[in-house]
Image (cartoon, helix red, strand yellow):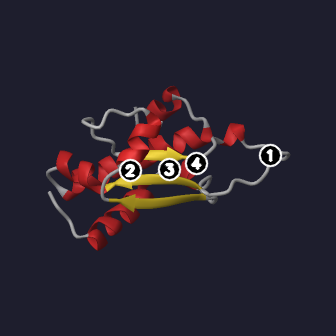
Amino acid sequence: MKLKSTEFDSAVRRAYEHIPAEIRDRMDNVVLTVRERPPREMLEEMGYPPDEPLLGLYWGASLPEHSFFSPPPAYPDTIYIFQAPLEEMCETLEELEREIEITVVHEVAHFLGIDEKRLEELGYG
């Protein structure tokens, strides 16, 4: 499946709206951005194998790492959604939107410190 970037952005918006408010409401200071694929440098820095598809990535300090006394970060915390790998694994728009939702929720969980058990309770395990 292959969408135009504007169509994919709309799918990301729809998927985001399905995320439980408990999670979505805590994303005020997190940027959600779409990229075609992760840059090679990003994969290398993370130690991620280049032949494995990366659907999304949380880039920043997790909420438990934030402190009143910490200096403000130079860049906002960011969740990257990678369009091409998501499209390659999905056959329908509905499937794509569900995978985007799952990816965003898992990346937000990294930010919030939500454990796998709670993700399972929310239907994202």
With respect to residue 21, does 4 lie above or below?
below
Q: The disc labelled 2 sits on which kind of residue?
A: Glu
Taking depth in this image into account, of 57 and 117 the one nearest to the observer is 57
Which of the two labelled residues, at mark 4 and mark 1, occupies the earlier sequence position?
4
Query: Quick check: 23 left or right of 93?
Result: right
Decide: few, some or many residues near mark 1? Use Cα within 10 Å; few <14, some 14-19, many ≥20: few
Give residue 6's position: percent from left, percent from top: 30, 73
How far apart, in angstroms, are the residues tagged by discs 1 and 2?
31 Å
Taking depth in this image into account, of 98 and 70 the one nearest to the observer is 70
Q: The disc labelled 4 sits on which kind of residue?
A: Glu
Task: From the image, tell me which residue sits under label 2.
Answer: 101
Which of the two labelled residues, at mark 2 and mark 4, occupies the earlier sequence position?
4
Q: Secondary structure at mark 4?
A: helix
Q: How many marks?
A: 4
Q: Which mark is residue 22?
A: 4
How far apart, in angstroms, are the residues tagged by discs 4 and 3?
5 Å
Cβ–Cβ under 8 Å for marks 4 and 1: no
Q: Secondary structure at mark 2?
A: helix
Cβ–Cβ under 8 Å for marks 2 and 4: no
* Residue 56 visible in the picture: no
Decide: few, some or many residues near mark 3? Use Cα within 10 Å; few <14, some 14-19, many ≥20: few
Cβ–Cβ under 8 Å for marks 1 and 2: no
How far apart, in angstroms, are the residues tagged by discs 2 and 3?
10 Å
How far apart, in angstroms, are the residues tagged by discs 2 and 4?
14 Å
With respect to residue 24, does 109 lie above or below?
above
Mark 1 or 2, closer to the camera: 1
Q: The disc labelled 1 sits on which kind of residue?
A: Ser
Task: From the image, tell me which residue sits under label 1.
Answer: 70
Task: From the image, tell me which residue sits under label 3.
Answer: 20
Mark 1 or 3, closer to the camera: 1
Q: The disc labelled 3 sits on which kind of residue?
A: Pro
Mark 2 or 3, closer to the camera: 2
